[in-house]
Amino acid sequence: MTRTGPDGIRATVDRATRERALHRLAERRYDVLVVGGGVTGAGVALDAASRGLRTALVERVDLAAGTSRWSSKLVHGGLRYLAKGDLPIAWESAHERHALTTAIAPHLIRPLATIVPLDDNTGPWMGALTETGIRLADLLRVGSRTPRTVLPPPLRVSAEAALLHAPGLRREGLRGGIVYWDAALEDDARLVVALARTAAAYGADIVTHCSASQLTDTTAMLTDELTGATLSVQAAVVVNATGVWAGEHEPSVRIRPSRGSHLVVRSAALGEPRAMMTAPVPGHFGRFVFAVPHPDGLVHIGLTDEPADGVDGLAPEVPEADETFLLETMSLALERPITSADVVGRFAGLRPLVASAKDSQDTADASRVHLLVDDPGLPVSIIGGKLTTYRRMAQDTVDAVCRRLTIARPCRTASLPLVGAADPATLRHVPAPARLVRRYGTEAPQVAALADRFGPWLADPVAPGCPTLGVELLHGVLAEGAFTVDDLLTRRTRVSMVEADLAPAIPVAERVLALGATIPTRLAREVTARHTVGA
Ligand SMILES: Cc1cc2nc3c(=O)[nH]c(=O)nc-3n(C[C@H](O)[C@H](O)[C@H](O)COP(=O)(O)OP(=O)(O)OC[C@H]3O[C@@H](n4cnc5c(N)ncnc54)[C@H](O)[C@@H]3O)c2cc1C
């Protein structure tokens, strides 16, 4: 079934929708103006638009320009919160994981096995305790009704089976392992793009490269970062969803950013693992370094947690100390230690940890708990939380918006599929390469077909050995609101994850942008918008 949003607008964000939105912003009063185009802001825009509110979202740089593209890409089921005794958060995570994997974005999410090795570091008592915790966490899966066909239950395995899951594991003292399943995103930035495009299909105006300043409860100044033009806008409610920048617009909130670094290595360096591997951090009970295998043959190793006051949240550097810590800790779990020579990419993101200025003793780890601030005369601010729980954060925010508007509109997003979403059986039969289906779902055939229409060179990788194809860049320009080389190579696709791929891909991205500028909007819509929301 092909369906558009209620006002018939398709799930397209492009130059024409941006221009139209900027005109509307100058002329009309919106119900909601969302500031910030990360997972939180895009989630709020979709929730508000799907409740029938006139919604606009402005983003200073690009969709997923901040923390939302630098996550570990895990859709947590609640195990880590259960380990801390935080049952409500654990339950919320399991519930949101269920909605994401079964209804909202099954195309972008895969089951991810994790192997916990039972070896000299894990005595029999610790092994039994770990297994009990994992089995309790599985009750959250059962309680949230995620079928075992989507996420299998945990199992204890022999040393041989543990090595089948992760051949690179250190063999000395290995007596077996526990395997459990959680969920992982193909690409966090693509989730944000899908949310924003689905919001557009429900009538939201999405404007990237447009910063907001002087936020009040009902007004903001906007600056078009592409032209320098400024305009004053009005909305019944302004929402501040600016992540680590939220404190700039909400005086009662003080953000204390914390940096989380990751390294990217080729899968072969870790023996081609099929499961996530964990290595306990010596001297820190319950703290682990982990290695997450991704389908394109890369493994992401994370994670650090270091204070990062004054650090740029768009692209924080990975300091040498973080790299050394991750390499040395992960190597403790490996047969062959890894070194900097194995590292092909690095990335870091900032967690917006909140210290409330109302009570300086009252600190909350906003990387897991979200904070909604609804002070009179100020925007509604939504801060912290997790990528996994963005939908719940958006629901709470739009409930607050509705209270300010004194209207009652039920939230619809728990079962609202994003553009490209379909059930696994449908996805299995989408006639396109598996990798494109993982990234574009039901839209994959039309992405692949762009090469037939606009040139066979678009079917080629954008850099030697890089899995990203030219058609993905063109789709980014025609349907996904990409305007710059950086939008294309660091957010619509993740070419820049492997540092050596970036330089050769830049001229390809420039060629695609030039081609995109010659394609009339009507034709672009014809070739990209055949599948829309609910396809
Ligand atoms: C290292 C790391 C790993 C993580 N791993 C996971 C994980 O595996 N699973 C999970 O569930 N969660 C994870 N998280 C948490 C998750 O990534 C964040 O909670 C989430 O991405 C925050 O999204 P956000 O939209 O609130 O902020 P952001 O993504 O930072 O978005 C804020 C946006 O606001 C824009 N903006 C700022 N100021 C303005 C302005 N004045 N005008 C217009 N726009 C503006 C910025 O450009 C930015 O795009 C991780 C976090 C970190 C740091």
Image (spheres, grey):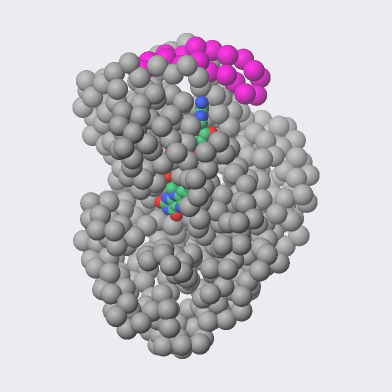
Image quarter of residue 247: top left
Picture residue at 36% right of the left edge, 45% below the top: 365
Picture residue at 37% right of the left edge, 57% below the top: 76
Residue 295 visible within the image: no
- Give residue 233's position: percent from left, percent from top: 46, 14
- Give residue 120's position: percent from left, percent from top: 43, 83
Picture residue at 41% right of the left edge, 64% below the top: 284
- Give residue 322's position: percent from left, percent from top: 58, 56
Image quarter of residue 223: top right
- Of 472 and 217, the residue lying toward us: 217
Picture residue at 53% right of the left edge, 18% below the top: 222
Report the magenta residues as a range: 217-236
327 relative position to 101: left or right: right
Query: How many numbered tags mark residues here?
Result: 0
Residue 36 visible within the image: yes
Dominant secondary structure, magenta: strand
- Give residue 390's position: percent from left, percent from top: 37, 43
132 relative position to 114: left or right: left
